[in-house]
Image (tube, rainbow, N blue to C red):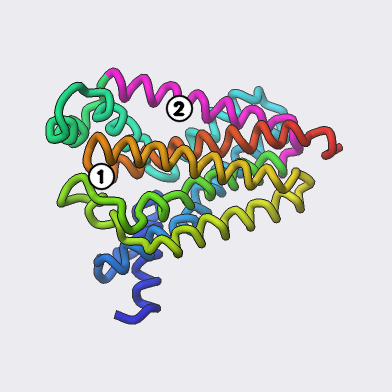
Amino acid sequence: MSRRAVTSDGLRLAVGTLTALRVPPPSRVDRAVAGAGMLLAPVAALVPAAAVAVVMAAGTALQAPPLLVGALAVGALALSTRGLHLDGLADTADGLGSSYDRERALAVMRTGDVGPMGTATLVVVLLGQAAALSGLSSLSWWRAALLAGLGVVVSRSMLPIACAVGIPAARSEGLGATVAGSVRRPWAVAVVLATAAVTCALLAGAGVPWWVGVVAVAVCTGVVAAVIARCSNRFGGITGDVLGAVVELALLAGWAALSVGAGMGAASLG
């Protein structure tokens, strides 16, 4: 299979899996395509990032209540991704919160029902995300939109790290088994560094301290490392649900870091 074909199928996999857009399915899905799909996750993230940015721009320009704007932006993101990652977050929380052994915990995650732990986790994370976005209300409408969109892209750039070689799948079937260990570590690091570089450049161009981008990416990476370590210890590896949890928790961490960092530099924006 040619590199061009792998890239094309990888992009289709990324867009079809990570967004609500309808695209032709990949001609085949093997380890190479799965790895390409995860590497291209930040590119696919431009779609939900645009949805969030539009809501943030409109709400901030209209001077709507900040928390309301943040909540609507989070809702727009959920619609643009079919709530896939939120479902994974809830299932992962239920699995981690169960007192069962590994196999029964994985069975809990497969049921699709949301238990008390999953519900509580969703409420806290969604509220935190909306609150983090509301902190961008002190910025101009286009800066608020830019930072909100960047947070989405940064969170998806964590997927190559979560799927790097050496991280096993918890099950022998499902999305997790397809993508686990499919990304070479140097490529995973390269994607994160490239995302950090682009984020810092865009922030500097918008008058926001460039180091805010470094902090955001570093915080996200730390959160992802902690989630992967915990899930690997509890489940024996990752699943598609764990990847959803990685995205949502990285998003919360990224938005919080961008909001706090931009607030610290708000005086220089004028």
Q: CA distance from mark 2 to mark 1?
A: 23 Å
The dot on residue 237 is 1
Residue at position x 38%, y 49% from top?
162
Residue bearing mark 2: 125
Image quadrant holding the N terminus, namely bottom left
Instruction: Please tell me whether residue 119 is drawn above or below residue 110 in the rendered image.
Output: above
Residue at position x 26%, y 26% from top?
94
Q: In terms of image quadrants, where is residue 88?
A: top left
Q: In terms of image quadrants, where is residue 32?
A: bottom left
How far across and down, in percent of the image, does residue 6 sit?
A: 35, 73
Q: Which residues are magenta?
A: 116-142
Residue at position x 57%, y 56% from top?
195
Residue at position x 39%, y 78% from top?
4
Q: Secondary structure at mark 1?
A: loop
Instruction: Please tell me whether residue 40 is drawn above or below residue 4 in the rendered image.
Output: above
* Towards the viewer: 215 or 244: 215
Sooner in the amino-acid sequence: mark 2 or mark 1: 2
Q: In terms of image quadrants, where is residue 131?
A: top right
Q: Amino acid at mark 1?
A: Gly
| Image-based side of 210 in relation to 194, left or right | right
Dot 1 crowding, Cα within 10 Å, few <14, some 14–19, many 20+: many
In this view of the protein, can residue 12 be seen by the observer? no
Q: Amino acid at mark 2?
A: Val
Overall secondary structure of the magenta stretch?
helix
How far across and down, in percent of the image, does residue 194 sit?
A: 57, 60
* Towards the viewer: 78 or 42: 42
How far across and down, in percent of the image, does residue 138 sit?
A: 74, 30
The dot on residue 209 is none
